[in-house]
Image (cartoon, helix red, strand yellow):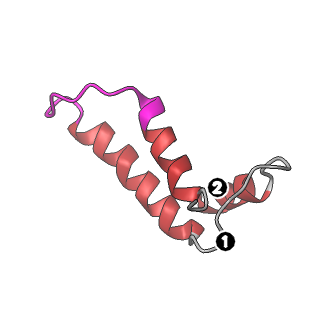
Amino acid sequence: MSARPQFLDILRAAPPGTTVDPGVDPDDVFDMLLGAVLTRMLLFSATARARPVERTVEMVLRLLRPLG
């Protein structure tokens, strides 16, 4: 079972005034998010970068916002 449909539902349910760039493919954003989560889970102890998970969330939100 994939979490992709739920991710797309979350984007569609964004509150009014929240902007998601229509030029961004949500599947690409999901793939990048999945890669970030897997990297954090598998390599966290091997890397010396103890970054808070909120940093990853912030980066995903940046991917979704329109430029300018």
| 62 on left or right of 37 | right
Name the kind of residue labelled 2 in the image: Phe
Earlier sequence position, callout 1 versus callout 2: 2
**Residue 30 at x, y percent in the picture:** 51, 60
Q: Secondary structure at mark 2?
A: helix
| 19 on left or right of 54 | right
Q: Is residue 40 visible?
A: yes
Q: Residue at x 43, y 40 (%)?
A: 56
Q: Which residue is tagged 2?
A: 7
Q: Nearer the viewer, residue 26 or 63?
A: 63
Magenta residue span:
44-55
Q: Residue at x 50, y 40 (%)?
A: 58
From mark 1 to mark 2, how far is it between C-alphas?
15 Å
Name the kind of residue labelled 1 in the image: Pro
Q: Residue at x 15, y 28 (%)?
A: 48
**Residue 53 at x, y percent in the picture:** 43, 31
**Label annotation for residue 22:** 1
Does 52 appear above or below 57?
Answer: above
